[in-house]
Image: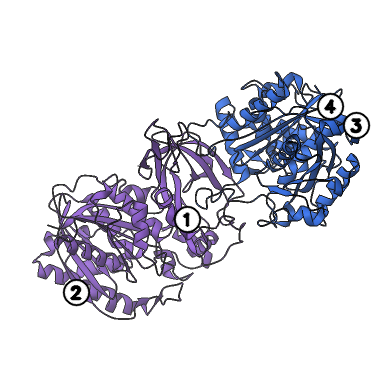
Amino acid sequence: MARSIKDEVAIIGMGCTRFGERWDMGLEDLAIESVYEAYEDAGVGPDDIQGCWLATASAPLIGVGGTIAANALKFNNIPIIRNENWCASGHIALLEACMAVASGVYDIVLALGVEKLKDTGYPGLGTGRGMSPVLEARRTSPGSFGMIATRYFEQQGLSIEEGKALIGKIAVKNHDNGALAPRAHFHNKITLEQAVKAPIIAWPLGLFDCCGNSDGSACAIITTRELAKKFRPDPIYLKGFGIAMDAMLPHTRPNFDWIKFNSLMTSSKKAYDMAGIRNPREELSVAEVHDCFTITELAIYENFGFSRWGNAREDIDSGFFTRDGGLPVNIDGGLKCFGHPVGASGLRMTYEIYKQLQQKVDNPQRQVKNPRLGLSHTFGGPPQLSAVAVFGNEVG
Amino acid sequence: MAGIVSYGGYVPILRMERKIIASAWGRGATAGERSIANSDEDSITMAVEGAINCLNKMDRKEIDGLYFASTTSSYAEKMNAALIAAAVDLERNVLTMDFTNSLRSSTAALRAALDAIAGKSAKKVVVTAADTRTAYPKSDQEQLFGDGAGAVLVGDDDVVADYEGGFAVSNDMMDVWRNPEDQFIKQWEGRFVLGEGYTRNMKEAVSGLMKKYNVQPGTVSKVILPAPDDRTLKGLAKSLGFTDAQIQDSLLGNVGHCGAAHPLMMLSQALEEAVPGDLLILAAYGDGADALLFKTTDKVGENRSRRTMKSLVENKMMFTSYARFLSYKNIVEALPGEPFRLLPSATATWRENKTSTRLYASKCRACGTAAYPIQRICYNCRSKDNYEELRLSDRTGTVYTFTRDNLAGRSDDPVLIQTVAEFEGNIRFYGLMTDFVAEETAVGMKVEPTFRRLYEGAGFHNYFWKLRPIK
């Protein structure tokens, strides 16, 4: 990238709805719930917002533009820029908003993610996830990620029982964390036996290897480093970011091994470089990564350098990524427990990092001690697109 | 001299014991099994299978025409043969024709092709016939019918059997018929159908042929007589002066009567079993009868098809649910699954013919990287529009990764195996598996492409290639 924007912008307020089956709340209601929390948190109002970056992926299916945000929130004739970028939509709205502030064009902007999956009439994201009615006629999200698990087990020489137990431990960990997160969709703890024996969704992935489908919204109010402290004593600074998209679907990419994802490796490296991180395993205090499926979280450990290649198993078995481990991952329960309202997820994960870095987590039982740097991440498509953001609570 | 250059058939892998159908109705069973088109198969896909089996790796540029025959064409108006010719990857300047509405449509197509060769208007024509007829639930035909395809390539060079001549009888009668609005086949009283219809007309055509070409019954190696049942077949053969040993196996016991495809399926099987110098008579019935006389050459022992009829008949997976049979045959509507989000587009389907219907990958001329679908910019070296095209439909691959997806299928066929396969030439292909035993799927398994019907949308059928385990 031509220029680092490390510490140039800061988040001064965030909001996040309760995630779940919000049958009585529409897209507009969900947006209002998260945005008014963020206004209060930042001490600003609608007239202060100079631009809005909106992420919403699937509902309503076409023609939404920025209408949801405009109609719901009654801004003062500002630009509303909507993006849809698979599961990374929320992060991309957030990072585009940060770049808009860093550019000097705007002082205070809003990044808003909102999604209403429970209006579709179907329990999953659906089949035919892609561009082509023949090539991707029946592609599903569990199916695409199931193929990562098949390949990982094969490459590591794991039996199906060993493989299922390995990823099952990630589900157990995230449910253990979600039980302590009031805004999560699911609060139930599960046993490894439950995880391993659950009904199969897309073999080898079972029910507890898959995240839920939820409604939700989260948002961030962003300003410059110079203005941030006028709003609050503890703004959270953007330290670095990376966004990368592979040039072909994993399904058809020549020689792809389904283990080393270029988009994951490139996006995390760019974020670490801008943030000045040399050893993420040691330097990050907490991370929220894209656990749409348990195998995805495992793949991210290795692609992000949290674990050495082939060493995720050792770190999972030693509890390295649990709340009390060396690097707590998905300490709020992750997508596993919040569900994955696509456009909202990246901002919801960033909300957890923001609160952790301020030491203001809504349940002190999941507050990490002396946090300094936190990472949030989403991984979109079949998968093909990765967006990483690193935040810190101090300049420098 | 015009004759048969190659031949091949196709039998869907699914078979059901007839007693399962019988017991669902508490009625008597016919012995044996019937074939059932899979939920992603229809007359077009089976005709493609038959034609590819027959052509094998033969250079497609040599083919001048493709004639398709069926009583159950996938489209009532639209050239079905044009779609089949594209999937088979024939050249643009071929003559395509649909022969429809009669069980004799395949022999009519075959005669037209042979006449085109004899008349020097074509050098090589492939005739492919497929049928998937629907009988009334509880009827005898529900058990007796099967689904399948047969194909022959005709030409005047390098033939395995010379065409000696033909004889035809036309006879209008209401014995077996189906109106345009009907799903099920109708028929008049059995004795009228078998006696005055089938037996009398077939006898007239075969005896007319033998008289015309001065053939004595004793000199015939095999008489190939698609028949409604084996008893009627034996009676007909006997009345023509043939012994049981001269009767070509009817395929009724373990496959079932496959409608317009049946004459070509039996012909393919007979040619597989023939020796040089054999005299073969093929006849087919339907409002009259066609009879054709062939004499095999010393090339008849060459195995030119990809798979033999024998192996296709033997390669089977048992289908045990009568409820699913009714659903596959569109007789009952099972619980709908999730709607498709990606509706096919006629323009996109047309534009992507090379990739989607003809199944071509690209190989970069600069660095050799190959990929499917066709990539205008090379994934590896970014050379632009600098590639050669490779047809994948006659290549094989191995499973690189897969998942057994329980939520993506139809409610009557719920498990889908999403598969990434590595094809010869280092080409990755992503598609659905078909004709599989779910528990047997494994990384490293050998697969081949097969043309199938994916789903309906935008008012037309959406066809694409799937992967089939190679047994």
Mark 3 or mark 4: name the one nearer the start of the chain: 3
- Name the chain under label 4: A
Closer to viewer: mark 3 or mark 4: 4
Residue A210: quarter of image: top right
Give the image location of residue A82, x and y in percent.
70, 48
- Tell me the kind of residue under disc 3: Pro
Give the position of the C terminus of chain A as an image quadrant.
Answer: top right
- Pointer 3 local density, CA inside 10 Å: few below 14, some 14–19, many at least 20: few
Question: Could you tell whether B138 is left or right of A104 in the image?
Answer: left
Disc 2 designates what residue?
B204
Which class describes the residues within 10 Å of circle 4: few (<14), some (14-19), or many (20+)? Answer: many
Q: How far apart are labels 1 and 2 at the CA level?
A: 51 Å
Disc 4 residue type (three-letter): Asn
| Front-most of residues B366 and B246 | B366
User: Which label lies toward us, 3 or 2?
Assistant: 3
The alpha-carbon separation of the residues under discs 3 and 2 comes to 95 Å
At mark 3, the secondary structure is helix
Residue B354 visible, this angle: yes
Q: Amino acid at mark 1?
A: Ala
Q: Where is mark 4, residue-wise?
A: A393
Which color is chain A depicted in?
blue
Q: Chain of mark 2?
A: B
The alpha-carbon separation of the residues under discs 1 and 4 comes to 51 Å
Name the residue carrying label 1.
B348
